[in-house]
Each structure stands twice: as structure tokens, then as C-alpha cells.
Image (cartoon, helix red, strand yellow):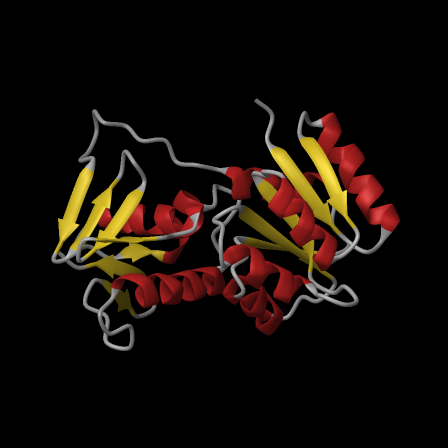
Amino acid sequence: MAHRILVVDDDPQIRRVMRTTLVVQGYEVADARSGEEAIERFRDDKYDLILLDMNMPGMDGIATCHEIRSSSDVAIVMLTVRDTEKDKVTALDAGADDYVTKPFSTPELLARVRAALRRVPNNPETGPQFIKAGELEIDLQARRVKLGGNVVRLTPKEFELLRHLALHPNVPVPHMKLLQAVWGPDYGEEVEYLRVFINQLRKKIEKDPSNPQLILTEPWIGYRFNM
């Protein structure tokens, strides 16, 4: 089945261009003119990805992203004319999986869509399907994480990041390898993505996120899963 995408932007021309571009690639596409309308559409239907404008009148993209992320792990890519690291971190902190700066090319948009929808397949012949570290339990086959017996809800990208680290325990994994393993081969320089997602993971799986025991920082190198 084709992936279903919701395009959210107050500019009708941008919505029209993105809809045409995505439909040609085989995606099913719906659109919304505002954050409020996006919330209504999201509650009424199921989507695999939301392309969300960051700067809209009324309920902006950040507030919309927070609202959607509070109840769903749907893939979200934020669209904005701003390109500072602060703006990127703000978008990622709100729950976005990725960030695209306007104006963007068609190949760039499609690459970001593929990266957001990307799922690393499980391969039972090449590794474990269940990992335990203290009270943390990771079921790779079911894509389920528990802490102290309680289910921890992770976004797809948070899970993929934890999965990759846990499959390479006790060794530093460089930033570039992590980015390419989770987001895809076109990534490698977006270190701010890792800072935000590691911080989110620590809040969810560490007893004391300010003093992490599971996901450790390797200065100037990357991160290490401690088992």
C-alpha cells in the first residue's frame, strides 16, 4: 500500500506543488491549510508522514507538532524558511524527525520524505531480537521498549537510534555512523539531530537523565550504549 502523507501549509501554491510532486511518486496525499485543520484531519484519518510548515498564522507548526506528538509516533518533517541551528533544534525538540529549509528542490524534499519513512528491517539471522540492560528491555522484533516493566513510547527515529546503539554495546559509535544508520546515507553532518534525540531518549529511559548510565557521550566521537 502507498504511504499516506498530510501536507500542512498556509500557502496554497506550496500545497499544490508538494501534492503534485508526491502523487507522481506514488504517495497518497491530503492537505491542510492550518495547524487546527491538520489536527482535525489527523484525528479523522491515518497518515504515515506529516509535512508541516513551521510558520503559520494561528496554531503554528511547533504547537501543531507538540499536539500530534503527544498521542502519536507518526513521522513528521518540519518545513521552514529559517535555517539557524536554534530553529532546527526547536523543531526537533517539538518532536519532528527531520527539517527542510524553504526553498527546497524536489530531489531534496523526496529524499527527506524517504528518510522520515525509513525503517531499518530486522534480520533475525544476524543478531539478537531481545536486549536487556538493567531494567531496560528492548524487543527488536516487536519494536517495543519497556523500563521496569512499563512500556516506553518511542518515536520511530528514537527507536532506531536506541536499536543501533544497543546492537553495538560498550563501543563508541561515531556521529556519522549513527546518522547514516538511522536517517540514511545522505546524512552525516547533522550532529544537532543526535544531541536532541539522545536527550529525548535519556528522558524516557534513564532514571536520572542528567546523569545517564545507559547512553553515554563519547566527547568528539559519538555515543556509547553501556551494558
Query: Which x, y percent locates residue 175?
Result: 38, 57
Quarter of the image with the C terminus is: bottom left
Q: Which of 210 and 110 is in front in this view?
A: 210
Q: Which of 86 and 185 is in front in this view?
A: 86
Is residue 221 visible to us here? no
Q: Which residue is drawn at 62% across and 39% down?
A: 45
Q: In this view, does 206 lie above or below 68?
A: below
Instruction: Return the residue found at the far right.
Output: 13
Quarter of the image with the N terminus is: top right
Q: Which of 90 and 143 is in front in this view?
A: 143
Instruction: Return the residue found at the far top.
Output: 1
Q: In this view, does 125 lie above or below 157?
A: above
Q: Is residue 198 above or below residue 117?
A: below
Q: Which residue is drawn at 31% across and 65% down?
A: 202
Q: Residue at x 59, y 31 (%)?
A: 3
Q: Answer left or right for 212 relative to 103.
A: left
Q: Answer left or right for 117 relative to 61.
A: left
In the figure, residue 102 lies in which quadrant? bottom right
Q: Which residue is drawn at 66% across and 48% down?
A: 51
Query: Which x, y percent locates residue 81?
Result: 74, 63
In the figure, residue 36 lies in which quadrant? bottom right
Query: Which x, y percent locates residue 90?
Result: 57, 69
Q: Answer left or right for 32 relative to 11.
A: left
Query: Which x, y percent locates residue 171?
Result: 19, 55
Q: Answer left or right for 212 relative to 108.
A: left
Instruction: Return the residue found at the far bottom.
Output: 210
Is residue 85 visible to us here? yes
